[in-house]
Image: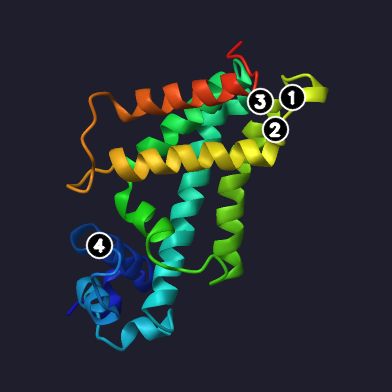
């Protein structure tokens, strides 16, 4: 057993959880299995986490932090136009779901309450904040008298991206087959939606 000598125990437990989520799904492993995967005794994880749910909450927090960074990079200050930048956010959403499936599962499928910790709540809010910022910039392009609520647009965009990511952009056998790329489906859906609100690409 490697015990505490192999490095940071907390980091090792997070890595173990991510590996097990990838292998067994977010609900398919126990706290004891995470300890075994990390190479420590079953009692050792309790130095950092009171239970498996707290470990999952920490994994989800880290996922949301990485997610926020990914979305913010895609937004890039709304350049060259807010609508084009919003499209990049959508594609970045799908890419994250495909390339970070264990984090994505912990964030959205682990049954972890958003209020499990203040840090998790804040991380989730900041990630959504990028999408809301984008929606606010997009609706500003519409005349004020017919401008839709930015929060409504943000929630609709989130729902569209999340639905496509969950159904069509996963890297496993749960992915549904499509005659077109998930990114193309998302772009088409976004353009139809925004066009219905009177929002043009440029």
Q: What residue is shown with label 3? A: 138
**Which label's residue is closer to the chain start, 2 or 4?**
4
Report the residue marked by disc 1: 140
Dot 2 and dot 1 residues touching (CB under 8 Å): yes
Dot placed on the residue nearer the N-terminal end, 1 or 4: 4
Residue 120 location (% of width, % of height): 54, 63
Q: Nearer the viewer, residue 83 or 14?
A: 83
Q: Is residue 96 visible?
A: no
In the displayed structure, 198 sits above or below 10; it is: above
Q: CA distance from mark 1 to mark 4?
A: 41 Å
Residue 40 point in image, percent of width and height? 25, 80
Quadrant in which the C terminus appears: top right
Q: Residue furthest right?
A: 145
Q: Residue at x 58, y 19 (%)?
A: 195
Q: Which mark is residue 25?
A: 4
Q: Residues within 10 Å of mark 3 (few under 14, many from 20)?
A: many
Image position of 130 (left or right of 169): right
User: From the image, which quarter does the N terminus lie in?
Assistant: bottom left
Q: Regarding mark 3 in the picture, which secondary structure is present there?
A: helix
How far apart are labels 4 and 3 at the CA level? 37 Å
x then y, percent, for residue 144: 81, 24
Marks 3/1 in contact by CB < 8 Å: the verdict is: yes
Residue 136 — which label?
2
């Amino acid at each position: 057993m490697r015990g505490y000598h192999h490095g940071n125990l907390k980091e090792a437990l997070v890595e173990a959880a991510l590996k097990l989520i990838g292998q067994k799904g977010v609900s398919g492993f126990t706290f004891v299995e995470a300890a075994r995967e990390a190479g420590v005794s079953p009692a050792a994880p309790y130095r950092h986490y009171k239970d498996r749910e707290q470990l999952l909450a920490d994994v989800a927090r880290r996922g949301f932090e990485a997610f926020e960074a990914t979305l913010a990079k895609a937004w890039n200050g709304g350049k060259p136009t807010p609508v084009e930048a919003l499209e990049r956010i959508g594609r970045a959403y799908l890419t994250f779901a495909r390339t970070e499936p264990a984090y994505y599962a912990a964030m959205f499928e682990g049954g972890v309450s958003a209020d499990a910790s203040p840090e998790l709540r804040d991380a989730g809010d900041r990630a959504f904040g990028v999408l809301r910022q984008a929606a606010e910039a997009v609706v500003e392009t519409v005349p004020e008298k017919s401008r839709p609520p930015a929060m409504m647009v943000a929630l609709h965009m989130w729902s569209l991206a999340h639905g496509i990511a969950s159904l069509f952009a996963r890297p496993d056998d749960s992915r549904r087959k499509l005659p077109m790329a998930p990114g193309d489906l998302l772009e088409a859906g976004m353009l139809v939606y925004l066009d219905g609100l009177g929002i043009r690409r440029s």
